[in-house]
């Protein structure tokens, strides 16, 4: 245990499962031993960690439900003694005008009002330069392309058609939204804090923060040392471990990423329809066995789960990893959505892959690579995973993890947009390696 205070320091709430592991990965890289829980734990027993991340599945549910779940997570994190709190969402700010980033942030700020120093104020910074997400003058870029021209405008659940995050967030909240401009960030921590003070004085409660490099994220992270609540993508968490060290609350750790070796068979499950996952599925299929889940066939009552498991068994018998996927092109997704409805189609894919995951575990699979935030949430719930110890990074934003439950499992939970083209192969090699 590296926490000098004896209790967890940073308490985090993530709106999906892969986002939670993405954030936890950043904290482990900073030397914080990190545990991720799947949902809000039923017990208030102390968890041995420097940082705690509660993974919710709240990104696309009604705002009132997202608020209730987030506040329940906050209550548990407070019971654990956390000193600072982090609300984590996607680096592409996935949230419609009726979405949850603004309402949840408002609710958390209200709940923390008694602990908030210098007035209720927080930043919103989803920037993740390592994965090509940068913010300049409030506009979010994916690589060299504005968010609304990056393919995210075709997202089946949260189509992003405006790259100006100040406008996007302002449409979600009655609180005043401002901007921490790059001019201030480039001048350093003290200037950023002056910008915070000026924004507060102008009645701003939430401010989008510009960042185009990791150096900017370290500046923002240090500037946020006195904020009770921080919101954003995982990138801004880069600077947070250093704050606790400077305050004398966190020691050095050389084994924050250490995981046990787990024996067993391996499988890959993919439900994301993102460009990155489509290319990863295509690369795998060139040389490795794969079975495609057809949502329309599942909707007709055909035994697609049984078919997928029968296909997998012939390769598992030879200790060969197999891919089961529902990944499709945007046009294919739209066809299914027209037939079944948007929410119904998504739920069907998730529940089908969750059933496949249970069947694979019964057949001896203990190492799972899962692509897609919603899919990952469904799979970990199906496998009855309660909490994860976070290990070393596989690709930016994606760490290896191991369950802390009675049945040991090794998991790599990947956001749909993350990972190199050979991610599935790379992740399986990483999980096979055990301790990093």
Image (tube, helix red, strand yellow):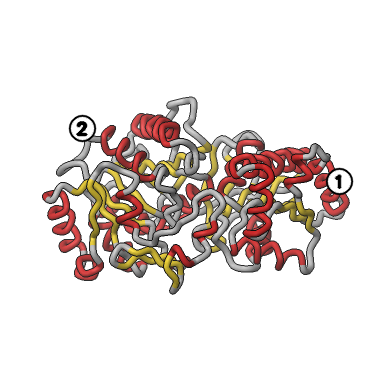
Q: Secondary structure at mark 2?
A: loop
Tags 1 and 2 touching, CB below 8 Å: no
Q: Determine the residue located farthest toward the bottom in the rendered image.
A: 144
Q: Of 282 and 177, which appears nearest the observer? A: 177
Pinpoint residue 240: horizontal percent, then vertical percent. Answer: 32, 54
Residue named by callout 2:
114
Examine the rendering and report whether any part of residue 419 can be seen: yes
Q: Secondary structure at mark 1?
A: helix
Q: Is residue 404 left or right of residue 285?
A: left
310 sits left or right of 404 in the view: right
Residue at (16, 61) in percent of width and height: 190
Residue at 80%, 43% (x, y): give it. 304
Label 2 neighbourhood size at 10 Å, few (<14), some (14-19), many (20+)? few
Residue 212: name its quadrant: bottom left
**From the viewer's perspective, is residue 302 above or below residue 333?**
above
Q: Position of residue 176 (x, y in %)?
A: 22, 47
For label 1, the crowd category at 10 Å Cα-Cα, with few meaning under 14, some 14 to 19 and many 20 or more, is: few
Residue under numbered circle 1: 310
- Name the residue rendered at 27%, 41% in the picture: 174
Residue 42 versus residue 356 in the image, above or below: above
Could you tell me which residue is drawn at 31 percent across and 67 percent down? 136
Residue 253, given in percent of the width and then of the height, sits at 41, 54
The mark nearer the N terminus, 1 or 2, is: 2
Q: Taking 213 as reference, is 196 above or below it? A: above
Side of 48 where 385 appears, left or right: right
The spot of residue 4 in percent (x, y) is: 32, 44
Which of the image's four quarters has the C terminus? bottom right
């Amino acid at each position: 245990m590296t926490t000098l205070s004896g209790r967890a320091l940073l308490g985090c709430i993530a709106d999906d499962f892969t986002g939670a592991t993405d954030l936890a990965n950043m904290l482990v890289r900073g030397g914080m031993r990190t545990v991720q829980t799947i949902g809000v734990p039923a017990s208030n027993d102390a968890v041995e960690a420097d940082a705690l991340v509660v993974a919710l599945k709240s990104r696309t549910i009604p705002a009132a439900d997202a608020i209730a779940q987030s506040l329940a997570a906050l209550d548990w994190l407070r019971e654990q003694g956390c000193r600072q709190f982090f609300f984590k969402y996607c680096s592409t700010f996935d949230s419609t005008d009726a979405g949850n980033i603004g309402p949840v942030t408002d609710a958390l700020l209200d709940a923390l009002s008694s602990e908030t120093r210098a007035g209720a104020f927080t930043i919103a910074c989803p920037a993740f330069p390592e994965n090509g997400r940068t913010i300049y003058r409030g506009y979010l870029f994916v690589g060299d392309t504005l968010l609304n021209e990056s393919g995210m405008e075709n997202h089946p659940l949260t189509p992003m058609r405006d790259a100006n995050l100040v406008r996007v967030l302002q449409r979600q909240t009655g609180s005043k939204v401002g901007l921490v401009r790059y001019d201030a960030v480039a001048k350093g921590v003290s200037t950023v804090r002056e910008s915070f003070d000026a924004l507060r004085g102008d009645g701003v409660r939430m401010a989008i923060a510009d960042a185009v490099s990791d150096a900017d994220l370290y500046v923002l992270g240090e500037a946020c040392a006195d904020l009770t609540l921080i919101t954003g993508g995982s990138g801004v968490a880069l600077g947070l471990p250093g704050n606790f060290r400077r305050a004398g609350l966190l020691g050095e750790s050389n084994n924050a990423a250490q995981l046990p070796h787990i024996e067993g068979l391996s499988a890959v499950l993919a439900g994301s329809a993102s460009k990155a996952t489509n290319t990863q599925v295509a690369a795998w299929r060139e040389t490795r066995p794969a079975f495609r889940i057809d949502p329309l066939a599942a909707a007709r009552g055909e035994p697609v789960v049984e078919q997928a498991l029968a296909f997998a068994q012939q390769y598992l018998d030879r200790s060969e990893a197999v891919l089961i996927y529902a990944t499709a092109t945007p046009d294919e997704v739209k066809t299914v959505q027209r037939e079944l409805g948007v929410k119904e189609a998504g739920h069907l894919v998730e529940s089908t892959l969750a059933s496949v995951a249970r069947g694979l575990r019964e057949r001896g699979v203990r190492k799972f690579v899962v692509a897609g935030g919603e899919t990952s949430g469904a799979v970990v719930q199906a496998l009855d995973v309660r909490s994860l110890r976070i290990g070393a990074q596989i690709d930016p934003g994606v760490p290896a993890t191991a369950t802390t439950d009675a049945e040991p499992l090794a998991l790599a939970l990947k956001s749909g947009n993350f990972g190199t083209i050979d991610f599935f192969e790379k992740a399986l090699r990483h999980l096979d390696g055990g301790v990093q």
